[in-house]
Amino acid sequence: MNDWLSMLLLVLLAVAIIALGWWLLIATEGVYLGRRVVVWLYDLFADRYDRVKNYYREYEHMYLAQPVMERIAPHRSPLVLDVATGTGRLPLALLRHAHFQGRVIGLDLSRRMLRQAARNLYIFDDRVTFIWGSAENLPFPNDTFDVVTCLEALEFMVRPQIVLGELARVLRPGGLLLVSQRINTRLMPGKVWSSGQILELLAECGIQDAQAQIWQVDYRKVWGYKAGSSPVTGGRPLAEVLRCPRCRAQILEQREQTWLCGNCGARVYTGADGVIEMYPLER
Ligand SMILES: C[S@@+](CC[C@H](N)C(=O)[O-])C[C@H]1O[C@@H](n2cnc3c(N)ncnc32)[C@H](O)[C@@H]1O
């Protein structure tokens, strides 16, 4: 009898460990274990990400690119920043839109997701730039972008409130912000905001007229504009919008495949796939 009881306890313990591992690594994508684990998991699954997500081109057009274009009309050539771009979902939807004439910068902390993004968008490589960097310390000056987006990512960030502040900081007054908010909260206690909370946090960051819409199954899209108004940034050259990730001076000079900081001498390299590698200087 004692043997049976021990066996049962062992089986229960094994099941509990497997369930905990599944919850920590799969269901919540490592967010309770810290940023390194989140990024390690995305690096690990980068090659399979697009196959698993299987986004439909028509839906991406209808529910992402077209609503962005309608909200910024009549402008067609905005400078867009997509934070936590992953494999380049939003840049791809926008650049495939027949009327979009702007440029997109996609930033992510997973180098392998960015390698896949660069592959997915190689035909648009004159209008898209990918940056390896952290959403908590965006390497851009204040009030830079016409549109800032961050999709399916805030709930996987260790410090989402700081990220929200960064998204608002780099958006120009009058610019459009689009973030997504997870609404299936059962599996991620303490990691998702209620509608009231996100609207309040956005207001604190100076985002006004925020509106939420149900999107996909587990998300809301939340739209808003930064208070004030300013001229459209449009297609400013990259050198004008990059900031040194180490000293934050805004004097990065391009020398072939390298960006050199005129203030602290830091060197930012560009990978063979064209991704600008800022993150090594932030660590
Ligand atoms: C679920 S994916 C979403 C990707 C893309 N936005 C989409 O909708 O397909 C989440 C992304 O957030 C990125 N990420 C997580 N924490 C980050 C951080 N602190 N800074 C930048 N990217 C981060 C991950 O590397 C991953 O690519």
Image (cartoon, rainbow, N blue to C red):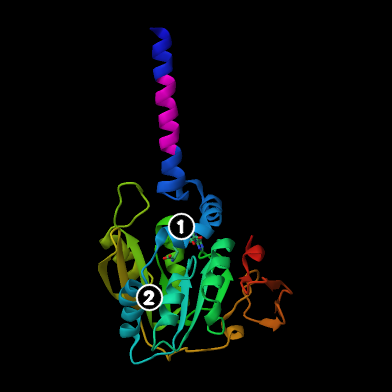
Q: Is residue 17 magenta?
A: yes
Neighbor class of circle 1 (other Cα within 10 Å; few <14, some 14-19, many 20+) is many
Q: Which mark is residue 157?
A: 1
Q: Is residue 158 magenta?
A: no
The answer to whether mark 1 is within 8 Å of ligand 1 is yes
Question: Is the Cβ of the residue at disc 2 closer than 8 Å to that at disc 1?
Answer: no
Residue 174 in picture, x, y percent from top left: 37, 84
Residue at image position (33%, 74%) is: 58
Q: Which sits earlier in the primary sequence, circle 2 or circle 1?
A: 1
Q: Residue furthest top?
A: 1
- Which element carries disc 2, helix, strand or loop? strand
Asked whether 6 or 31 is in front, the reply is: 6
Q: Is residue 187 above or below residue 208?
A: above
Quadrant position of residue 65: bottom left
Q: Which residue is mark 2?
A: 177
Specify start and end residues of the magenta stretch as a single range: 9-20
Examine the rendering and report whether any part of residue 139 can be seen: no
